[in-house]
Image (tube, rainbow, N blue to C red):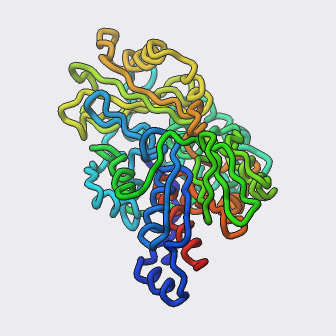
Amino acid sequence: MKRRIFLKSIPASLLASSYWTTACQAENGINPADKTVIVIGAGISGLAAAQKLQEAGFKVSILEAQDKVGGRVRTNRSLAIPFDEGASWIHGIDGNPITTLAQEAGMTTFQTLDESMKSYDIGGITRKTSTYDSAEDEFYTVLGSMMKKGSDSQSFEQVFNQLYPEKKNDRLWKFFLSTYLTFDTGDLNTLSSTLYNEGEVFEGVEKIATNGYDTVATYLAKNLSVSFNQRVSAIDYSGATVNITHNNTVTPADFVIVTVPLGVLKNNKIVFTPSLPSAKQTAIQKIGMNCVNKFLLTWETAFWDDVQYISYTPELRDKFNYFVNVKKFQPTTNALMTFAYADYGWQTETMTDPQVTSEIMGHLRDIYGSSIPNPTRLLRTRWSTNENSFGAYSYTAVGTEMRHFEDLAEEIDNKLFFGGEHTEVDYFSTAHGAYLSGIREADKIIALL
């Protein structure tokens, strides 16, 4: 699963040890145990912040709207195999903080290989590897140069169609645009034509969790005070302390860290008093929140190729065109995982399970023949209509400026703080970005003492 191609080191301050934290507290003579911190959201960001602050001696509690920790890191085990509804991969293991966390948490992983793939066109026609590889190389060449030809007011799709009209209806190119770009970013008709390749990545191989990405969330939550099913509706930071309204209860705190997803902020699910600064409101409006949905299907026996990935190039972009062979890393399980993005991702959220299954099977039967059986079970996500997220993750939409991510991360009056992947300018849209944002906000509070 390819990610953005630029590299940047983690600032050392984000990974500062608790030793230096303790030294600063002793020097300042202020006891953090006298200060209360409420973290809103028990996702990776909130858990990371809470853990670090608790280790530093603060009184920390977390308010979580759902009934478990993890936020968009959710693992469904109802079929006796872990289906990660949100984050699945560690994207680049070298220097990635999730790599160490995963090891400490007992997460087991499997290295996925992009090269282990078979590509099919309509009619079940096998695509030559050389044809696929040549088009892929050209695709990345285009991605590396097209941003220089775009403009702040134009979407990626507008500029691409102007520059490469012969490619916009090419099925293989539509596959690349969908799976290698829309998946990582957002809808091409709203994706910025100048910022689509922004963001940093870690080097190293890609690894997928095999026993559930939620092992990381569970590990981070150990010994933390988390109150579940607590939906925050208002935050009043007009006084000396911050008052949080949740489930018709008001709780005060010296510091509050808001780590709810960008989609929740976009939908004004939390009323802030006073209103958030205009720069932060603009950032909330301008940064995009995409739609990516995942689907896991199981069978009694496997009928597909013994490769990691199976690609299919239908006429409609973003529709069940990429299949992950779960059997490669869960050998006793006969399962495929597929995806829907952008507008079609939205459309799936209005479809019944039989309708979704029928559409997926239409593609698989075109590849493998009409006699293949229907799946025994289906698991799916509906991230964009999920009231706890209203989308999958952030991206650089038309009108986004990179400073908007920094505006979202800006604290207010040294008492109201903001974390989450959408506040991490270098690593937005990732689980490791969410984690780093939590560490960043904890460091801010620690530095105030």
Q: Position of residue 10 (x, y in %)?
A: 49, 71
Q: Nearer the viewer, residue 220 or 4?
A: 220
Q: What residue is drawn where x is 42% and y is 28%?
A: 295
Q: Position of residue 136 (x, y in %)?
A: 48, 44
Q: What residue is drawn where x is 47% and y is 61%?
A: 50
Q: Quadrant of the C terminus?
A: bottom right
Q: Is residue 293 above or below residue 115?
A: above
Residue found farthest to the top: 371
Q: Nearer the viewer, residue 64 or 135?
A: 64
Q: Nearer the viewer, residue 383 or 56?
A: 56
Q: Taking the image as drawn, is residue 191 in sight?
A: no
Q: Is residue 61 above or below residue 86?
A: below
Left or right of 377 on screen, residue 17: right
Q: Taking the image as drawn, is residue 271 in sight?
A: yes
Q: Position of residue 126 (x, y in %)?
A: 36, 27
Left or right of 223 on screen, residue 447: right
Q: Position of residue 439 (x, y in %)?
A: 50, 66
Q: What residue is drawn where x is 57% and y is 19%?
A: 350
Hey, which quadrant is residue 365 in on the image? top left
Residue found farthest to the left: 332
Q: Is residue 133 above or below residue 83?
A: below
Residue found farthest to the bottom: 27
State how many labels appear. Answer: 0
Hey, which quadrant is residue 333 in on the image? top left
